[in-house]
């Protein structure tokens, strides 16, 4: 039970002020607040967005105060866990910001068409409609959040000295993606195909839709075996929090790459955590196209950006005290 004692043991040299990963959140909050103020009249929910950011800053301050009162591993963990949980609020917020910019899906759908001569996001599920394959794809996609939890918990219990570095890298990567999503409004096939109609998709004709997604959030229901357990998990998550945003590059793919690299770096011998995650990661990469969430070019960009962000953020994290 030493681990339980360690969690509540008071730290001898508690950190002062905000952690580096919290400064990332504060920086993103202020950046997007500035964007809101400059585009206030164009945003339909500007006041609610400003209030939401004030609440985020209040949460950061409250968690800092709790840690100041009781500086231990548990309160430190709470500060990381809170910011990871709040990503569920930040993600749809990118739509509220990028909806005022002209949609760019026609560029990325055309890129897939040029590469393959057809739309892989349309035909992948049609070529492999079998229930067992559909469930594998949805299992891969549904494993995204559990992989984040597993890596976070692993670092907390087994690599605690690097726990702050892990949080900095992971949250840093997320918020870099979110900045890209704000200024590069791409919705992905599940929204764009519905907007332009099936005839245009089959004919390889990808018109610009301008500000269509300013008013429309309808999406195609995910293809696959609709009686499957994992299908319902993925579709339920989409209905609850999905928005026409965040397609390029794929943050699901990019963050999964970051998680794999963190897992590899966490171990020095057998790399068991890395190999545990790898099958789910591979399923994830294919699933993003299968369920029509992304174009193939989104996946490729996600792979490359995941490597790039990790390569930039991990060395940078070493410059800060975790």
Image: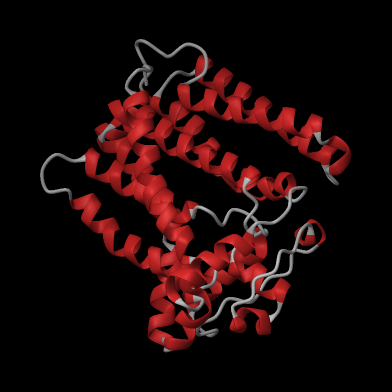
* Image x and y of residue 166, in percent: 36, 34
Q: Nearer the viewer, residue 71 or 245?
A: 245
Decide if residue 304 is on the left or right side of residue 118.
Answer: left
Name which residue lies at 32% across and 22% down.
318
Q: Quadrant of residue 209?
A: bottom right
Decide if residue 155 is on the left or right side of residue 141.
Answer: left
Decide if residue 67 is on the left or right side of residue 193.
Answer: left
Q: Nearer the viewer, residue 29 or 101?
A: 101
Name which residue lies at 25% across and 37% down.
158
* Image x and y of residue 106, in percent: 63, 64
Evaluate whether residue 294 shows in this view: no
Q: Is residue 49 above or below residue 138?
A: above
* Image x and y of residue 175, in percent: 54, 38
Q: Exactly how many numbered labels are in the figure?
A: 0
Q: Quadrant of the C terminus?
A: top left
Q: Quadrant of the N terminus?
A: top left
């Amino acid at each position: 039970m030493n681990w339980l004692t360690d969690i509540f043991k008071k730290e001898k040299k508690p950190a002062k002020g905000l952690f580096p990963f919290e400064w990332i959140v504060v920086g993103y909050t202020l950046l997007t607040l500035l964007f809101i103020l400059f585009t206030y009249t164009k945003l339909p929910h500007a006041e609610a967005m400003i209030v939401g950011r004030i609440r985020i800053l209040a949460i950061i301050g409250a968690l800092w105060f709790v840690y100041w009162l009781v500086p231990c591993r548990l309160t430190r963990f709470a500060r990381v866990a809170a910011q990871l949980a709040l990503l569920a609020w930040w993600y749809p917020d990118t739509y509220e910001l990028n909806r005022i910019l002209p949609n760019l899906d026609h560029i990325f759908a055309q890129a897939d068409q040029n590469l393959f001569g057809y739309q892989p996001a349309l035909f992948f599920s049609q070529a492999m409609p079998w229930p067992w394959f559909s469930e594998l794809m949805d299992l891969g996609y549904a494993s995204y959040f559990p992989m984040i939890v597993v890596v976070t918990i692993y670092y907390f219990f087994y690599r605690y000295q690097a726990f702050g570095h892990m949080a900095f890298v992971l949250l840093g990567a997320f918020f870099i993606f979110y900045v890209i999503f704000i200024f590069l409004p791409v919705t992905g096939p599940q929204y764009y195909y519905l907007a332009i109609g099936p005839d245009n998709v089959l004919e390889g004709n990808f018109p610009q839709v301008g500000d269509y997604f300013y008013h429309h959030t309808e999406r195609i229901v995910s293809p696959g075996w609709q009686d499957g357990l994992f299908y319902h998990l993925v579709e339920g998550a989409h209905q609850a929090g999905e928005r026409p945003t965040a397609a390029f590059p794929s943050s699901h793919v990019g963050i999964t790459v970051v998680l794999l690299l963190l897992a590899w770096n966490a171990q020095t011998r057998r790399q068991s955590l890395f190999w545990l995650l790898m099958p789910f990661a591979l399923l994830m990469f294919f699933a993003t196209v299968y369920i029509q969430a992304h174009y193939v070019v989104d996946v490729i960009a996600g792979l490359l950006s995941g490597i790039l962000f990790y390569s930039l953020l991990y060395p940078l994290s070493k410059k800060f005290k975790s």
